[in-house]
């Protein structure tokens, strides 16, 4: 089949590579406009654009998805199917163009964790499993009928980075399977149970601020869900400290927010139990282990 692939972030790349190596043909890529990045504000291309340039695939980078010129360009490619992975919300004028429709890969077991940050929220909420879903696009975000799902076990040591990578790899397999199913016509769509839906809203700076009155386990999951970026954090002497890795330690009658440090170990008491901080970063300094950090900085005098 002839496919137009739409994506932007690194999460898209395993799916894009898998489709590119398959029997199907990617006739065009759609990605976000180049963005200014870094101190020099140099224009930076998305990973999807970089892949397209490397492999001589036609590229479209619309500012507005309802732009008439962009919509006509899509029609001119005569694609059978649109595949969407980590891109923007498509308007109906776009996703209804191809005869075989359009589908999206979502990094959760829908209807759980509908929204912009499903990987982070699965960890923050302490889930033991998650997965990926391919579903047909509809006007209401993440509500379309399901083609297939694949489960992933969340290990105790998983954080956002490791789980993101696992899901992107298994997602690539789900994308190719879905394309093959659509080509053969041998599939049955399954509706979502909206009563079971849970939200996965965009991560904001407020999300990552640690509240030490909460149980250590809950804070530990927050750290996992936001590591290595954008990171959970707290303030000490008006300086922001990012937390990358923690461990829950039992503690009777804790005093929330009380910091205990030695030459090698750093603990903070929570609403229940205490948290050992294993990796952290003081603003203006590099990420380091607690032992390295405590060689030059002490919380308790």
Image (cartoon, rainbow, N blue to C red):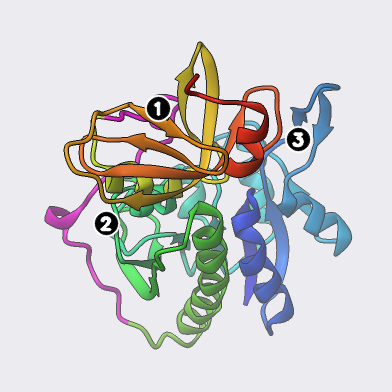
Element under disc 2 = loop
Q: Is residue 11 left or right of residue 191?
A: right
Which numbered mark, 1 or 3, is in the foreground of this view? 1
Q: Residues within 10 Å of mark 1 (few under 14, many from 20)?
A: some
- Between the residue at mark 1 and the residue at mark 3, the CA separation in whole angstroms equals 31 Å
On the image, the x and y values in percent for residue 138 come to 35, 52
Which numbered mark, 1 or 2, is in the foreground of this view? 1
Residue stretch rendered in magenta on the structure: 188-212
Mark number for residue 34? 3
| Residue occupying the point 50% across, 12% down | 237
Q: Which residue is mark 1?
A: 209
- Between the residue at mark 3 and the residue at mark 2, the CA separation in whole angstroms equals 32 Å
Element under disc 3 = loop
Q: Which numbered disc flags the more N-terminal residue, 1 or 2?
A: 2
Closer to the camera in the image, 76 or 56: 56
Answer with the quarter of the image where residue 251 lies.
top left
Q: Is residue 139 above or below residue 55?
A: above
| Residue occupying the point 36% across, 83% down | 187
- Between the residue at mark 1 and the residue at mark 2, the CA separation in whole angstroms equals 24 Å
Q: Which residue is mark 2?
A: 112
Q: Which numbered disc flags the more N-terminal residue, 1 or 3?
A: 3
Q: Is residue 206 above or below residue 262?
A: above
């Amino acid at each position: 089949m002839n496919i137009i692939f739409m994506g932007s972030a690194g999460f898209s790349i395993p799916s894009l590579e898998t489709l590119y190596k398959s029997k199907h043909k990617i006739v065009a890529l759609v990605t976000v406009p180049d963005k200014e990045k870094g101190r020099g504000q140099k224009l930076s291309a998305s990973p999807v654009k970089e892949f397209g340039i490397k492999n001589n695939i036609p590229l479209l980078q619309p500012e507005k998805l309802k732009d008439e010129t962009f919509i006509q360009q899509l029609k001119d490619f005569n694609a059978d199917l649109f595949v969407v992975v980590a891109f923007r919300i498509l308007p109906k004028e776009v996703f209804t163009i191809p005869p075989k429709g359009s589908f999206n890969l979502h990094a959760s077991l829908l209807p759980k964790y509908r929204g912009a940050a499903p990987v982070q929220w699965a960890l923050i909420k302490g889930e033991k499993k998650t997965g990926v879903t391919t579903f047909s696009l509809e006007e209401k975000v993440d509500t379309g009928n399901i083609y297939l799902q694949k489960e992933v076990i969340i290990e105790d040591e998983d954080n956002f980075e490791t789980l993101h990578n696992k899901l992107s790899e298994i997602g690539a397999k789900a994308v190719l399977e879905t394309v093959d199913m659509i080509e053969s016509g041998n599939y049955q769509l399954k509706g979502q149970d909206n009563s079971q839906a849970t939200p996965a809203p965009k991560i904001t700076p407020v999300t990552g601020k640690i509240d030490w009155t909460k149980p250590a386990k809950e804070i530990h999951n927050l750290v996992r869900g936001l590591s290595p970026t954008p990171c959970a954090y707290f303030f000490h002497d008006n300086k922001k400290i990012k937390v990358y890795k923690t461990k829950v330690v039992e503690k009777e009658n804790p005093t929330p927010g009380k910091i205990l440090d030695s030459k090698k170990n750093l603990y903070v008491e929570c609403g229940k139990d205490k948290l050992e901080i294993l990796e952290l970063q003081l603003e203006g300094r590099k990420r380091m282990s607690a032992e390295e950090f405590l060689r030059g900085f002490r919380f308790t005098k």
